Amino acid sequence: MNYSFWFVVGSQFLYGPEVLETVAARAQEMADELSKALPFPLVYKVTAKTNKEIADVVKEANYDSSCAGILTWCHTFSPSKMWIDGLRDLQKPWCHFVTQYNRAIPNEEIDMDFMNLNQAAHGDREHGFIGARLRKPRKVIAGHWQDQSVRDRIGSWMKAAVGVAVSKSMKVMRFGDNMREVAVTEGDKVEVQTKLGWQVNTWAVGDLVKVMNAVTEEEIDALMDTYRASYDIATDKIDHIRYQAREEIAIKKMMDAEGCKAFSNTFQDLYGMEQLPGLASQHLMAQGYGYGGEGDWKVAAMTAILKAMGENGNGCSLFMEDYTYNLEEGREYSLGAHMLEVCPCCAAAKPRIETHHLGIGMNEKDPARLVFEGKEGDAIVVSLIDMGGRLRLICQDIHCVKPILPMPNLPVARVMWQAEPSLTTGVECWITAGGAHHTVLSYDVTTEQMKDWANMLDIEFVHITRDTTVESLEHDLFLSDLAWKLK
């Protein structure tokens, strides 16, 4: 989907046609110039002067799937009562852009004509009131439209809004159920579809096997060429790699046929399959699909959403699981990995295809998988959990490092990181908030974007930072619990 954002400018007939022509010309100029600097086009739509104009453009935005959100700005004084119908019905993310055309007050030119034309300082305050009065989720960004910092903030908000658009059309294909007796991978799929737009349904593993059996050797040959070009092959068991290729082709065919962008499976339900998909899942994630192990459909969808939000960065968001800690004093780190399925987008060097025995699940052939170390850099880990009656998004700031140990006998991809505010306090905070063992780790998507995403979708947001303490978090969670029960 080629997303764009709409620029809706507010004014009124009071100022006469000449002023309105100037407003429209400036709005078009600003949209054109901003589009050159933003990750998505900003399309000037209208200088709205009536209730009907505003309501009509909102209706058009709501039903245009390519419109990912609207930016509003009141160049002149735009009475906010005429915005009520439109904003009440708005279903797309909204950014209130508080700016003005001129950067500085022109000492020699300023007169009442200038004042009548350049009224954003009080036009935007009138506009801000109605947003607050309607209690409408919105992002307020203030600053001159030519400032790079302002453009960066708008671009960041745009990516969060695209995450909402992807969420609203998200379809998740589940092969089998979640891992038996696991609580955190459960959830209310009806509530999730109502709040987030996700369609989460199950397809039989037997149906996948049928599609696998129909995959041709020529299709596998072509994918093997892709594997060789992308990865180093460090195994003689080529037939095991070819089996992963067969699985990948079949899973992709089924997802594409149903319009799904994410999938989950479980090693407890591999009926008719010779291997748990490892390399197959990893390479699908490298193409932008989301994945969740052990039937975790929530993290599968979130992985796909964060990958879409990070497309204009380096696209580095991935399914992750906390495995074990290094608790040596002064060397406290978390080691994240999974049995087979870590996306190679985070690899510090070219990944290797290896085959190793896996003692879990039905594995007649040793599953092929990509083995690598994750790259260094600031990142976040994100967990979406079902609190019963509401969803909670937990986000923690982390810093990924080169693993402090080579771990030569660990045959999986791995990422090592320092958690904020420290490993032990961070773990205590994460567990206090109910964070899952499965997460999405992202080097691209920021905490502010995840907060914006949660706000757009009206779900609870919890942020664990370098300044967070267990006591402060417990207090915040208590107040949040009360607030959400009253909503």
Image (spheres, helix red, strand yellow):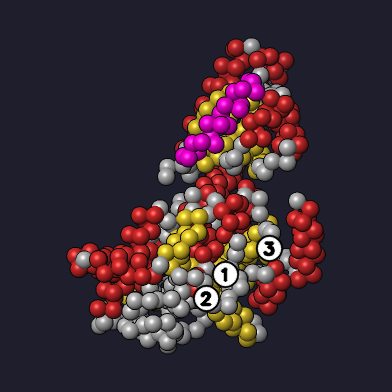
* On-image quarter of the N terminus: top left
Under circle 1, the secondary element is loop
Tell me which amino acid carries mark 3.
Gly
Q: Nearer the viewer, residue 164 or 426?
A: 164
Residue at (65% x, 85% y) in the render:
329
Q: Which residues are magenta?
A: 49-67
- What residue is drawn where x is 42% and y is 82%? 361
In the picture, the disc for residue 416 is none
Above or below, 125 against 461 in this view is above
Q: Is residue 310 visible?
A: no
Magenta stretch contains residue 79: no
Residue drawn at x 35%, y 66% is 207
Could you say which quadrant of the image residue 208 lies in?
bottom left
Residue linked to disc 1: 185
The kind of residue tagged 2 is Met
Label 3 to label 2: alpha-carbon separation = 20 Å
* Above or below: residue 177 compared with residue 99: below
Query: What residue did someone put label 3 on?
Result: 388
Residue situated furthest left in the rendering: 218
- Is residue 326 left or right of 413 when viewed as pictured? right
Numbered circle sitting on residue 179: 2
Q: Which of 379/201 is in front?
A: 201
Dominant secondary structure (helix, strand or loop) of the stretch shown in magenta: helix
Three-letter amino acid code of the residue under disc 1: Thr
66 inside magenta stretch: yes
Residues at marks 1 and 2 touching, judged by CB atoms closer than 8 Å: yes
Sequence-earlier tag: 1 or 2:
2
Counting from the top left corner in percent of width and height, residue 83 is at: 67, 28
